Image (tube, helix red, strand yellow):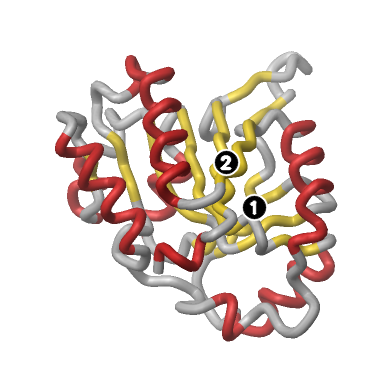
Amino acid sequence: MEKVCRDWAKQAFGEGLVKAEYWNDFETNAKAAAAEVYRVKDFAEGEAKLKELLKEYAERTTGGIMAVGGDENPALKGIYDRIAEGGTAVYTDKFDIYEHRATADIGISTAEFCVAETGSLCVDNYSYEARVATMLPYVNIVFVNANYVVENVSVACKIIGHVFDKGYLGFVTGPSRTADIERVLSLGVHGPNKLLIIAVENFEEGN
């Protein structure tokens, strides 16, 4: 899967810019923006939480699941494979994702880091499949390293400036929302209705 940066931790972060100590602020602000945040110890706990969420949204899995990030993270690939073995269609190939973009109501992806100030996730969505998996489904489930948190947007932009040459990056803050329709706040009009964040403490063990 094409990305703006292949290794954000080594090539972009820089010394002292990313700190786990900002986690509490991120979690508070992400929840304030209507995101659901689940912190887990490792990918085994992450898989259990993911399956719990998929069971909760079972009616949304009938059209299959679009899932990206498994080609870079063996732990995620294993999770996707086991979900598929359970009978749910999991689309990981970009051509399959394109074909099922209108019917898959759940997308699973990864984020590069968290922004404490705004409760946002920075997502490297250079590839078509990553953009589709995070923007079109009703439910957007995102795995992220719980230790990769920056203090504010200024630091986030500094990090991005270390590696950005071309491509597409975005900040995701809660589910999609708009108040353009008669000044009434509506969720899910221009994107996912739900943002579910699974933050893994021992994320690197999955690589």
Q: Amino acid at mark 1?
A: Leu
- Dot 1 alpha-carbon crowd within 10 angstroms: few under 14, some 14 to 19, many 20 or more: many
Report the label total. 2
Eye-nearest disc, 1 or 2: 2
Q: Position of residue 90 (x, y in %)?
A: 23, 40
Q: Quadrant of the N terminus?
A: bottom left
**Compared to 15, does 196 lie above or below?**
above
Dividing the picture into quarters, in which one does residue 27 lie?
A: top right
Residue at (81% x, 70% y) in the render: 155
**Residue 105 located left or right of residue 147:** left
Q: Are marks 1 and 2 in contact (CB under 8 Å)?
A: yes
**Residue 200 located left or right of residue 121:** left
Q: Amino acid at mark 2?
A: Ile
**Residue 90 located left or right of residue 201:** left
Q: Quadrant of the C terminus?
A: bottom left
Q: Which residue is mark 1?
A: 121
Q: Which residue is mark 2?
A: 197
